[in-house]
Image (cartoon, helix red, strand yellow):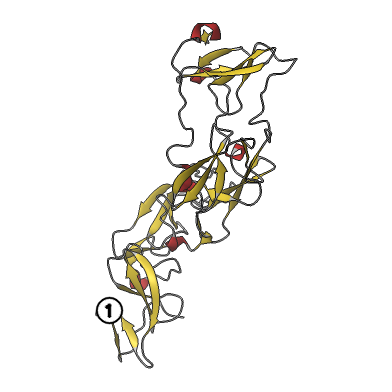
Amino acid sequence: MKVLIFLLALIGASYGQVEPYGSNICRLFADGVRLRNPGSCDSYITCNDGVEEITQCTGKNSFYNKDSKKCVSKAPDSYCKDPCNKKSPFWEADPKSCNGYFKCTDHGGVQDYCPDDLDFDFKEQACVYKSDSKCKGFNYCDIVPNNDVSFKNEKNCEKYYTCVKNKLKESFCNKGYYDVQRGCVKKSEVDCPVHPIPNGICGTAKRPVRDKFVDDERTCSGYLYCHDRGDNVVDEKPTIGRCPEGRFFDTVEQGCITAENVKCDEDRCDNMNSPKVISSELGCQHYLICKDGVMVAEEKCPEDMYFDVDTLECTTDVKSYPACSL
């Protein structure tokens, strides 16, 4: 049964708010971005080197307008306006937090909060357990300027967000991954904890991929195993795998083989404990310089010389590997 804790019983209790976005919101934004301070109407955050710098609006201009990025004299939107009006019931929800509410009086609303483990429910006119709450939680577009600021999606390296008409819009990088400072860049330039699984990697309902290993399309060493879920059933949760160090996945061989035998245009330094590796894009005279498993430069052997994957040097012996053959 739903448990209600009526507000009249909360007077005199100790209140607080937990930051809904976790610690340091600037980890999601580029340097120089200015945001409304979450839960506040009279201060803003500037992101510098991934660290929050809070500035307080003062004097007559005591409200912060997130879109004009200025302190103004009037509440700029519903986030900061007193929600109480002539038609209001005794209690109104606080648009700035799930556990906040306003006690409506003839002179406007008086703000207060439910205890930390409870949310305010407007329909019930009471504080309820979070499991019974209908509050959707933190809305980034209450603090992020519209149209001109993009920010990181921490659940998917290919995706990022913008706010359009105060609604969250999700976008994709056509190639590469999203970097908070530079936008969409090469995958190798972004530290992605878990590579996203491509849509349709295990086929379609008409032609499902069954009982087969497939390239993860994100790295040279990663692969996925599409299980046999039955006729006309696509495996929506393939098993994620990664080759041992120094080996890349080969679709034809259905396994992990030595890197010089696999043609792959992703970052070939990844999963290779080597300062140099052969290039797949420019031919066997070319090689890549690696640092900490990431490509940092591309080099070419002198004329009439070839890169040797065993000595990691250029040689006059003609060298040809499946990985670099054009």
Number of numbered discs visible in the structure rendering: 1
Relative vertical location of residue 295 with respect to residue 121 in this rendering, above or below: below
Q: Residue at x 28, y 69 (%)?
A: 274
Specify whether 168 is left or right of 31.
Answer: right
Q: Nearer the viewer, residue 247 or 292?
A: 292
Relative vertical location of residue 101 with respect to residue 285 in this rendering, above or below: above
- In the rendered image, residue 265, in percent from the top left (x then y), is placed at 45, 69
- Direction right: furthest residue: 86
Specify whether 39 is left or right of 259.
Answer: right
Q: Nearer the viewer, residue 60 or 29?
A: 60
- Residue that numbered label 1 is attached to: 312
Residue 90: quarter of image = top right
Three-letter amino acid code at the position of disc 1: Leu
- In the rendered image, residue 144, in percent from the top left (x then y), is placed at 59, 43
Q: Secondary structure at mark 1?
A: loop
Q: Nearer the viewer, residue 85 or 254?
A: 85
- Direction front: furthest residue: 59
Q: Residue at x 49, y 44 (%)?
A: 235
Residue 214: quarter of image = bottom left
